[in-house]
């Protein structure tokens, strides 16, 4: 069974709602010994964590201090910056870094959305290592449900339901959970392009232990992605229904295996 690391997509109705959820998330991080950051536009304030703010265990940062607002994010560079901050937190004696950030301003244009969705998966792969966690907020008053779905499907957990989730795994090229059907076909194609899970030794291994259902179009799309990488698609720990569909389709470039 895939392990769900704590990288959450949180769609919210008001800044007050997000701050309340962020406060809970960050308090939990403090209890676990992590350093915590609260990142929002403007001049952010986070009440209720005064002692942690005084000691440096908690930090409150403007979005401009951690992202290049108004530009198209560089997915790899942004993920590296959080990896470096996490390493600094570990060196300072914390157990890791936990960030709650309002990302709404970073997906304002199609170009920004495409790049930031790729970043979300890049940093999610890093989060799968277990020392970095994040809550990524998106304001439903400023972005629509389709935008939220495009980022939510690249998180392992969250309060929005895009139908399926494609996320990082410490033991596979990526993990898939939820349901893949006609409704999610286009979103899956986008998610695969943005996440671009890479094969190892000619095998593109997907942990599908959390995948409840997949139709023939979706399995074919996954197989095509692997073939485009010159790899065999390996579905690890599938449900009986998914295993049976692979058998019925007879896809020559798809293999099924149990938990390694």
Image (cartoon, rainbow, N blue to C red):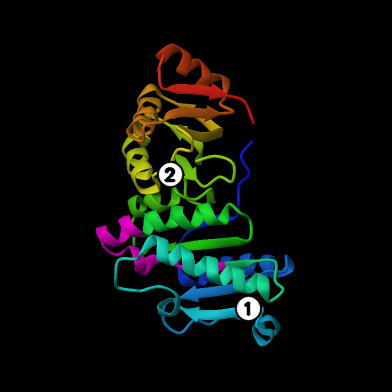
* Residue 109 magenta-highlighted: yes
Question: Residue 176 at what x, y percent from top left?
Answer: 50, 38
Q: Quadrant of the N terminus?
A: top right
Within 10 Å of disc 1 (Cα), the crowding (few <14, some 14-19, many 20+) is: many
Q: From the viewer's side, name the closer residue of 86 and 244.
A: 86
Q: Is residue 216 left or right of residue 88?
A: left
Q: Is residue 123 left or right of residue 70?
A: right
The residue at the far front in this view is 201
Question: Residue 109 at what x, y percent from top left?
Answer: 26, 62
* Residue 55 magenta-highlighted: no
Q: Tell which circle, 1 or 2, labels the residue nearer the N-terminal end.
A: 1
Q: Which residues are magenta?
A: 99-115
Res 85 quadrant in image: bottom right
Within 10 Å of disc 2 (Cα), the crowding (few <14, some 14-19, many 20+) is: many
Residue under pointer 1:
58
Residue under pointer 2:
162
Q: From the viewer's side, name the closer residue of 6 and 159.
A: 6
179, above or below 21, in the image: above
Residue at left offset 63%, top offset 56%: 130
Res 142 quadrant in image: bottom left
Q: From the viewer's side, name the closer residue of 159 and 71.
A: 71
218, above or below 160, in the image: above
Local SS, label 1: strand
Q: Can see residue 20?
A: no
């Amino acid at each position: 069974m895939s392990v769900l690391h704590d990288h959450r997509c949180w769609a919210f109705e008001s800044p007050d709602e997000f701050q309340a959820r962020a406060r809970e998330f960050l308090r939990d991080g403090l209890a676990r010994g992590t350093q915590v950051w609260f990142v929002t536009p403007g001049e952010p304030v986070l009440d209720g964590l005064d002692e942690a703010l005084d000691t440096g265990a908690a930090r409150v940062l403007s979005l401009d201090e951690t992202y290049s607002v108004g530009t198209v994010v560089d997915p790899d560079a942004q993920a590296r910056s959080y990896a470096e901050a996490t390493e600094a937190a570990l060196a300072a004696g914390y157990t890791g870094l936990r960030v709650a950030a309002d990302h709404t301003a970073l997906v304002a244009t199609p170009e920004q959305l495409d790049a930031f969705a790729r970043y979300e998966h890049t940093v999610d792969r890093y989060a799968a290592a277990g020392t970095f966690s994040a809550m990524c907020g998106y304001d439903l008053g400023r972005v629509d449900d389709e935008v939220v779905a495009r980022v939510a499907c690249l998180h392992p957990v969250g309060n929005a339901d895009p139908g399926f989730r494609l996320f990082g795994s410490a033991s596979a090229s990526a993990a898939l959970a939820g349901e893949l059907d006609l409704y999610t076909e286009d979103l899956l194609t986008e998610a695969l392009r943005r996440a671009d899970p890479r094969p190892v030794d000619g095998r593109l291994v997907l942990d599908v232990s959390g995948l409840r259902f997949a139709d023939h179009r979706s399995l074919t799309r996954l197989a095509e992605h692997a073939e485009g990488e010159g790899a065999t698609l390996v579905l690890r720990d599938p449900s009986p229904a998914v295993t049976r569909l692979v058998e019925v389709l007879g896809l020559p470039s798809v293999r099924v295996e149990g938990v390694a």
